[in-house]
Image (cartoon, helix red, strand yellow):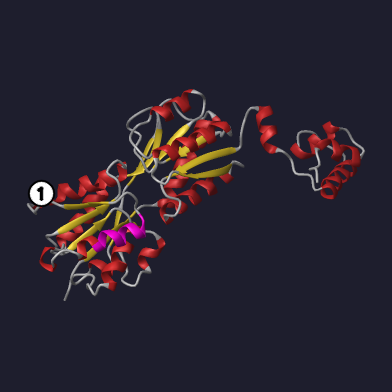
Amino acid sequence: MVAANVRDVAALARVSVGTVSNVLNSTKKVAPGTEKRVLEAIETLGFVRNDAARQLRVGQSRMVGMMVLDVGNPFFTDLARGVEDTLALSSRSLILGNSAEDAAREESYLHLFEEQRVAGLLITPVSRTTDRLERLRRRGTPVVLVDRFGGIGDFSSVSVDDRRGGQIALQHLVDIGRVRPTFIGGSSAVVQVSERLHGAQSVLSEAGIAPLRVIERPYMSADAGRDAAEELLALDPSERPDSIFAANDLLALGVLQALTRAGVRVPDDIAIIGYDDIYFAASAAVPLSSVRQPTRGMGKAAAELLTAEIDGTAGSEFQHVVFEPELMARESTRVPT
């Protein structure tokens, strides 16, 4: 079955191709009777406009690309919703890519987005290197960094002060009397992980507490959290930490599940705090303390910055919007009675 084209619509409606184009694009006034015949022909033939080809002809796409580190993490899906809602106000759509924290996969998606001639790109890069993004921008594709401060390279950015977030998490553990914390995170090459870790370490240094034990996993998933917890459970009970700061909530929830199954009491034996404050954090069997990021607000701000660059209304200076993290203390770090 061959898809109908605009000429087929014009023939059935007994009008010119130009008239069909005027109806589709609302570029010129068309008589009501003529418009009705065109719309009926479209319905009869099941015609679907090839919008990609039209955009290539006019030289402007209505699609925006977005690359995230882990599409399975509710933090990034909420972020994308904030972006999508804002883009819709300017009749733009979103193509979402998942790098899975893999540089090669990120490069593949960047190539795909460039082939699709996206109007702009929102990205949470895997690493600090921005050479590829700078080449993309020089070829005419605006780029805005999301969940990453754009202090390096010529990019606007939207981020949360992750170093401050790490300080908030560890200060909370210190405040409830925990002195043997462990940090569980993803690859140290991921900027957000290293910033949260550095913030946590600075609190311990000021408090004069022993160095922070660090457990690194290649991915920040619930499975990785369960695996890290098994490593801690293999230790003699006297050597186990009294608290855990996980670099995101998925890791923290995996840790919580594994510890609970092993009979470890949370928070009496080990307190746990995560990061992101995803929806599932508050509804866990033991409600999870977390450092909240304003995901929808971040997505909205990023989309607005990118839209301004696409439309040519952005100022000459790159903009850096930095949100403040917020402690959400719950049962998993309750002070034992």
- Say if 144 sits above or below 162 in the image: above
- Say if 232 sits above or below 314 in the image: below
Q: Position of residue 308 (x, y in %)?
A: 51, 34
Q: Position of residue 322 (x, y in %)?
A: 34, 42
Which residue type carries mark 1? Glu
Q: Determine which quarter of the picture holds residue 114.
A: top right
* Rendered residue at 48%/49% (across/down): 80
Q: Nearer the viewer, residue 215 or 297?
A: 215
Q: Position of residue 267 (x, y in %)?
A: 22, 70
* Rendered residue at 44%/54% (across/down): 72
Residue beneath disc 1? 206
Q: Helix, strand or loop at disc 1?
A: helix
Q: Determine which quarter of the picture holds residue 112.
A: top right
* Rendered residue at 37%/30% (across/down): 130
Report the predominant secondary structure element of the magenta stretch: helix
Work out whether residue 290 can be spotted. no
* Rendered residue at 30%/59% (across/down): 225
In what quadrant of the picture does the C terminus appear?
A: bottom left
Magenta extent: 221-230
Q: Position of residue 298 (x, y in %)?
A: 42, 47
Q: Determine which quarter of the picture holds residue 154.
A: top left
- The reply to whether the magenta stretch includes residue 225 is yes
